[in-house]
Image (cartoon, grey):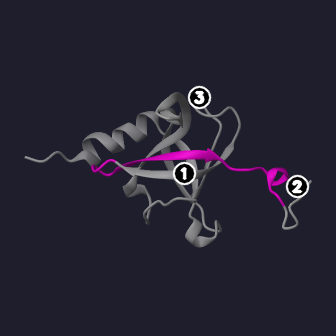
């Protein structure tokens, strides 16, 4: 007997804990946005410094239901997470760093905060202001 993860777990989880996000795929050059819900969190991650020495840090991540996207998520996609309880205090744009499907129809996306326009270096190597 197999478990229907979609109806028994993922959909109720997103309904209870999900918050609205906008998903911008890199393959569309960020022009199309897909509205869905996700569960934002700060995941623990180990950072190897030197010779087996590691420290633990946190990294932003979001859990999504793969059935909510008409395509597979990929690295460098962008996600706008709207400010809400349990999420960033302001609307924040992230870039997908790593895609981690769970094998049951869900996916955890490890994120990096997207650079602001003033953080982007121009072609001549100077900072744009």
Q: Which mark is residue 85?
A: 3
Which residue, given by chain and number where applicable, does mark 1 sit on? 97
Mark 3 to mark 2 CA distance (whole Å): 34 Å
Percent position of residue 69, x then y: 44, 60
The answer to whether residue 73 is left or right of residue 59 is left
Q: Tell me the residue at 12%/48% (across/down).
A: 2
Mark 2 to mark 1 CA distance (whole Å): 23 Å
Q: Which mark is residue 127?
A: 2
Percent position of residue 119, x then y: 81, 50
The answer to whether residue 119 is left or right of residue 22 is right
The answer to whether residue 108 is left or right of residue 20 is left
For this rendering, which residue is in front, 14 or 129? 129
Q: Quick one: label 1 or label 3, which is nearer the N terminus?
A: 3
Percent position of residue 35, x then y: 54, 55
Q: Is residue 113 above or below residue 68?
A: above
76 is within the stretch colored magenta: no
Identify the residue at the far bottom of this view.
Answer: 28
Magenta segment, which residues? 102-121
Crowding around mark 1 (Cα neighbors within 10 Å: few <14, some 14 to 19, many 20+) is some
Helix, strand or loop status at disc 3: loop
Helix, strand or loop status at disc 2: loop
Instruction: Tell me, yes or no, whether the two marked residues, 3 and 2, touch with CB atoms within 8 Å.
Output: no
Q: Tell me the residue at 31%/52% (across/down).
A: 105
Percent position of residue 89, x then y: 68, 32
């Amino acid at each position: 007997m197999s478990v229907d993860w979609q109806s028994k777990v993922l959909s109720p989880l997103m309904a209870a804990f999900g918050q609205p996000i906008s998903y911008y795929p890199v393959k569309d050059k960020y022009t199309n946005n897909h509205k869905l819900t996700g569960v934002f969190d700060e995941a623990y991650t180990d950072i190897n410094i030197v010779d087996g020495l590691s420290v633990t840090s946190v990294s932003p991540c979001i859990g999504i239901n793969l059935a909510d996207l008409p395509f597979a998520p990929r690295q460098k996609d962008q996600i706008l997470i709207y400010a809400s309880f349990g999420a960033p205090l302001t609307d924040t744009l992230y870039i997908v760093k790593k895609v981690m499907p769970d094998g049951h129809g869900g996916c955890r996306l490890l994120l990096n905060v997207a650079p602001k326009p003033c953080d982007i270096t121009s072609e001549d190597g100077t900072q744009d202001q």
